[in-house]
Image (spheres, grey):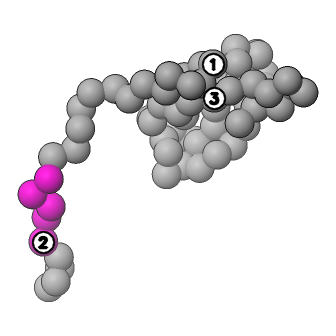
Amino acid sequence: MEFYCGSSRKVPTEELSYPLHDDTVKVTTCGHVSLLNKKGYRVFLSTALSGERIGVRELDDGRCC
């Protein structure tokens, strides 16, 4: 606490869009995403992204990026 000072910048409140991606998904509180509406297909990313929306694209071979 001796060296900490709060930031004067505000966190943006508008939702980001990903125009080049096929889908936008929200990361769960435990850090997982369900990809491309496939029930039961969950991937762990990171708890640091908890609550954030990310862009997902399905490649021709079925993988997601």
Q: Which residues are magenta?
A: 5-9
Mark pair 2, 1: CA separation: 40 Å
- Which residue is more in the foreground, 61 or 51? 61
What residue would you read off at disc 3?
56
Q: Residue at x 50, y 22 (%)?
A: 19
Residue situated in front as seen by the camera: 35 or 30: 35
Tell me: 50 left or right of 41. Answer: left
Name the residue type under label 1: Asp
Q: Check the image and report above or below for 51 versus 45.
A: above
Secondary structure character of the magenta stretch overall:
loop
How far apart are the two marked residues, 3 and 2, measured between alpha carbons? Answer: 36 Å
How many residues crowd mark 3 within 10 Å: few (<14), some (14–19), many (20+)?
Answer: some
SS of the residue under disc 3: strand
**Circle nearer the viewer, 2 or 1:** 1
Residue for badge 1: 22
**What amino acid is labelled 3 in the image?**
Val
Mark 1 and 3 residues: CB-CB less than 8 Å, in contact? yes
Marks 1 and 3 sit apart, C-alpha to C-alpha, by: 6 Å
- Residue positioned 68% across, 27% down in the render: 57
Task: Classify mark 1: helix, strand or loop.
Answer: loop
| Furthest-bottom residue in this view | 2
Q: Position of residue 60 (x, y in %)?
A: 85, 24
**Screen quadrant of the C terminus:** top right
The percent coordinates of residue 25 (x first, y second) are: 56, 24
Q: Decide which of tag 2 and tag 1 comes sooner along the chain.
A: 2
Return the disc, 1 or 3, that comes first in the chain's sequence. 1
Q: Which residue is mark 2?
A: 5
- Contact between marks 3 and 2 (CB within 8 A): the answer is no
